[in-house]
Image: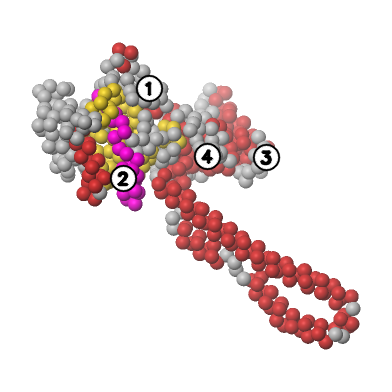
Amino acid sequence: MAFNKVWCALALGFLLPFSCAHTDFFTSIGHMTDLINTEKDLVVSLKDYIKAEESKLEQIKKWAEKLDQLTTTATKDPEGFLGHPVNAFKLMKRLNTEWGELESLVLKDMSDGFISNMTIQRQFFPNDEDQTGAAKALLRLQDTYNLDTDTLSRGNLPGVKHKSFLTAEDCFELGKIAYTEADYYHTELWMEQALKQLDEGEVSSADKVYILDYLSYAVYQQGDLGKAMALTKRLLELDPEHQRANGNMKYFEYIMAKEKEGNKSSTDSEEQEKETEVKKKDYLPERRKYEMLCRGEGLKMTPRRQKRLFCRYYDGNRNPRYILGPVKQEDEWDKPRIVRFLDIISDEEIETVKELAKPRLSRATVHDPETGKLTTAHYRVSKSAWLSGYESPVVSRINTRIQDLTGLDVSTAEELQVANYGVGGQYEPHFDFGRKDEPDAFKELGTGNRIATWLFYMSDVSAGGATVFPEVGASVWPRKGTAVFWYNLFPSGEGDYSTRHAACPVLVGNKWVSNKWLHERGQEFRRPCTLSELE
């Protein structure tokens, strides 16, 4: 039941040079919006420069046309022309003065304004690390949502408003970035896509020779010697003098001969052992479940279990603020119990929270179980900011609302965390509470473990971006203006391991959320302990 329910390279130096991996990097949609505005400003500046150059050339063109006509007449009868004293004077004047002015005009640099603007804006430009992060986000989306390279390249994604496509050069760049990460599986996919688009006649600066060079190497690294040889032969048809390809072909032929003799070299055996490691990352069962849930392929509840899920008007256990105006609440899952509150935060409140958070957005952090301190992690890719109740009446009002509806004391809770997940933004499976092997997880706060999580959805997401619980098979989809709530601990204080959850990558769109982590301290009488560990 529901209210409007919408449910590094091989040590064979002649193959390809060694490449070092980049660190993962993420840029939020909010910051990328600033880059769009920066680029628009640069386009305006560039058009002004073009106009200035066109005006300059127009002046030079008029001068040339005037003198062309004049000199044509003068050269037909030089003596007669110069017999006129005015013509003689004007010749002296032109050569002594006007040609110098024309020289100054030709030498005048009209690009000063544009170059000055470029210099100012360049400090805000993304760098190689940013580009690598954006590329890795695409590869992450490709894996999570089972997208083939052709679908991604042609921009055929669900819910897109502004369709875009990847050129052969773009595909080549993605393949190169995958290669620098020693990700030969994706290197092969994207180099093949680049080659396919060139074979279909796309005009591009991408060179087939370079593409085949990377592609044959990536295929070899994955153990497909026959395909690597075929690709190398094609490369040599285009460039018979290619030194590395000739060396590779001799090596491949040598290995192939050894295979036929049944005396495979120990070096090749080692490479075969690596094949399963690089063909495609050997995801754990949880990873597969996580990706299936992100795609909406999760566990389907039995009708019997579904009958236990209800929707209701909820007054916060007769809280005075909600007796006359209860809120809409619906059950998302039974065990663990996950409930969703509808129309629980207004558009105006959402915009205020976002505007307060935007200037402070920085790479999201997680608690290091060893140190208990906050640190960035590759499995959490978003940008976040923290807001205190005292700095805005809107934040204070939101905190009070959470306390009223959960019945838990928010004075010991963490500040409201606002997060923005842009392209490929995600938070891989994790627990919100500290486990027994992490005794110092929240020691510095002095408020005990995280007893519960309240999560606001502050935007709709065109595709992707679900909150999923791999242990139980639940998927909760973003719906603007709603919030979900669940307990991380049993009343006994023991952790509920079924609450392990993840934020799926955003496939299309932009995801804004804010969450409140409530702690044990202060809840002694609001949620009394029980004697049983799992109750």
Q: Which residue corresponds to mark 1?
A: 298
Q: Nearer the viewer, residue 246 or 122?
A: 122
Residue 109 vertical placement versus 31 (above, below): below
Q: Which residue corresponds to mark 2?
A: 353
Which quadrant would residue 510 be assigned to in this image? top left
Question: Which of the two labelled residues, at mark 4 and mark 1, occupies the earlier sequence position?
Answer: 4
Whether the magenta-drawn stretch holds residue 503 is answered as no
Left/right placement of residue 59 relative to residue 337 reads right
Q: Nearer the viewer, mark 4 or mark 2?
A: 2
Element on which disc 1 rests: loop
Q: Which residue corresponds to mark 4?
A: 162
Q: Which residue corresponds to mark 3?
A: 238
The amino acid on which the numbered mark 1 sits, given as a three-letter code, is Gly
Element on which disc 4 rests: loop
> Residue at point 58% right, 29% down?
227
The amino acid on which the numbered mark 2 sits, given as a three-letter code, is Val
Residue 6 vertical placement versus 21 (above, below): above
The amino acid on which the numbered mark 4 sits, given as a three-letter code, is His
Question: Which of the two labelled residues, at mark 3 and mark 2, occupies the earlier sequence position?
Answer: 3
Element on which disc 2 rests: helix
Q: Nearer the viewer, residue 334 or 145?
A: 334
Q: Nearer the viewer, mark 2 or mark 1?
A: 2
Please report the bounds of the magenta region as a residue range. 337-363
Residue 176 vertical placement versus 120 (above, below): above
Q: Nearer the viewer, residue 271 or 420?
A: 420
